[in-house]
Amino acid sequence: MKKVVNLSLDDIAEPEVEFRQVATQEGLEELASSIKRIGLIEPIIVTPRGNRYEIISGWRRWKACQMIGKATIKAIIVEKRPREMILMRIHENLFRENVDDISQGIYFKYLQGSFSLSNEDLARLVGKSKSYVEQRLRILHTDEATKAALGGGQINFTVARELTGVQDPDTRGRFLRYAIERGANYLTIREWKRNYLRDQRKGDRLEREGLPRVPTGPVPPLESECSFCRGKFPSEQLIILKSCGRCFEIIKTEEFILSSRGKQEAKK
């Protein structure tokens, strides 16, 4: 069993690339309050680096101890070669803590650059599928607004992944706003994207035929179909519903759908 020692916080250096790039102030303050109240339960793990020690695991714990003015911190010192350090950091962070997707992508990119790893090699190293790794590398190339919404918990990774595939910045920004305001899931974003691409292809055809690419006058809002009444509505007016399987089966019953369609047709 590794010996736990008390190290001065001033003798500890941050890792060259920190696995966790997003750490909320609120989360750090809660951790700092807990440490102040009951002490540090789990020591951090460090490795010698010159005259100091580099953090392998426990950056948030170290940061929280700094916030409350502690002079020392409990630590376990390990002697590891670079590749072994990386494997330990992956185990301590990726598999034990809720590390956000952007942080994972940044760290994966660092590993590729440092060790000339292919996507397949990297996937084997971190114990994930190739598609898992590629998706988190791809999310690094999305716009800052989408990354900020993902890092702030306003959207989840699957929504951000779908938004990344929208090339037009204005359209992507509109979809992002709808996703935040209406809670759209990735399937809804995918449908919006499919409709957008269909309209783009239609515009390309009109252009080839020498016709106006877009009609004159106000541009109509993006429309989507209601799953129940089949009516067409502006996408921002549709509401994302969450239901259990039992309630969803009731909603899908023929009587419910016919009633909804009848009400829709009566409005026409």
Image: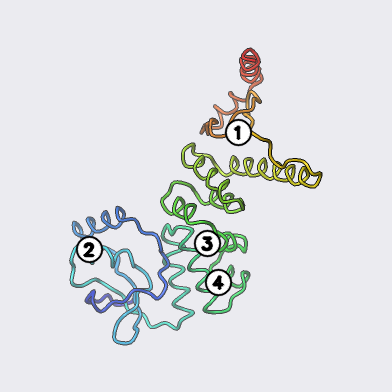
* Location of residue 267 in the rendering, given as x and y in whole percent from the top left corner: 61, 14
Q: Position of residue 225 (x, y in %)?
A: 64, 30
| Whether residue 217 is situated above or below residue 131 in the rendered picture | above
The type of residue carrying mark 2 is Met
Eyeballing the image, is 74 above or below 206? below
Q: Earlier in the sequence, mark 4 or mark 3?
A: 4
* Label ID, residue 140: 3
Q: Choose the circle earlier in sequence order: 3 or 2.
A: 2
Which is in the foreground here, disc 3 or disc 2?
A: 3
Q: Work out whether residue 171 or residue 244 is closer to the camera in this orientation and state it.
A: 171
Label 2 element class: helix
Which residue, given by chain and number where applicable, does mark 4 sit on?
125
Mark 1 — residue? 218
Looking at the image, which residue is at 53% across and 51% down?
Answer: 160
Q: Amino acid at mark 1?
A: Pro
Local SS, label 3: helix
At label 3, the amino acid type is Leu
Q: Nearer the viewer, mark 3 or mark 1?
A: 1
